[in-house]
Structure formats: structure tokens, C-alpha cells
Image: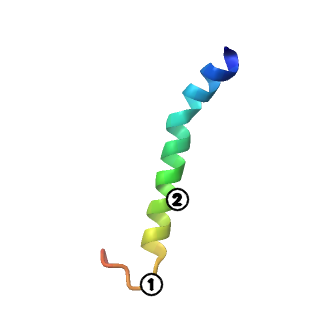
Amino acid sequence: MTALLRRTAALPFVMLAVSAIIFAAIHALPGDPAR
């Protein structure tokens, strides 16, 4: 039960980290359209 609770609490942080990595990877690409 404690492990499930911990995993649920960590989920938003994991999603935030993944989205930040994806965002950084997209903006690090050469010829990126946002520039």
C-alpha cells in the first residue's frame, strides 16, 4: 500500500520530467520552427 501511494505521489513529477525532456529535445533540434 505504501509503495502504491508513493508511486501515485511521484507520478506528476515523472510526467513533468518527461515533458521537460521532450520540450528540451524539441528546442535543441537544429532548424526548429519555433525560432
Q: Quadrant of the C terminus?
A: bottom left
- What's the mark number on residue 30? 1
What residue do we see at 46% from left, 78% from top? Answer: 29
- Residue at the bottom extreme? 31
Picture residue at 56% right of the left edge, 42% below the top: 14
Classed neighbour count for the residue bearing mark 2: other residues with Cα under 10 Å, few (<14), some (14–19), many (≥20): few
As drawn, 25 above or below 18: below
Q: Which residue sits at x=53%, y=49%?
A: 17
Residue at (44% x, 70% y) in the render: 26
The structure's colour scheme is: rainbow
Q: Going by the image, does 23 lie left or right of 8?
A: left
Report whether 31 appears left or right of 10: left
Residue 31 occupies quadrant: bottom left
On screen, residue 4 above or below 19: above
The residue sitting at the top extreme is 1
Give how far across and how far down residue 25 sits, in percent.
50, 68
User: Is 10 left, or right, of 35 in this rendering?
Assistant: right
Q: Which residue is mark 2?
A: 21
Kind of residue at badge 1: Pro
Q: Secondary structure at mark 2?
A: helix
Tell me the crowding category of disc 1: few under 14, some 14 to 19, or many 20 or more residues within 10 angstroms, Cα based.
Answer: few
Instruction: Where is residue 27? Give x, y as percent.
Output: 42, 71
Residue contact at pointers 1 and 2, CB within 8 angstroms:
no
Q: Residue 34 location, x and y as percent? A: 30, 74
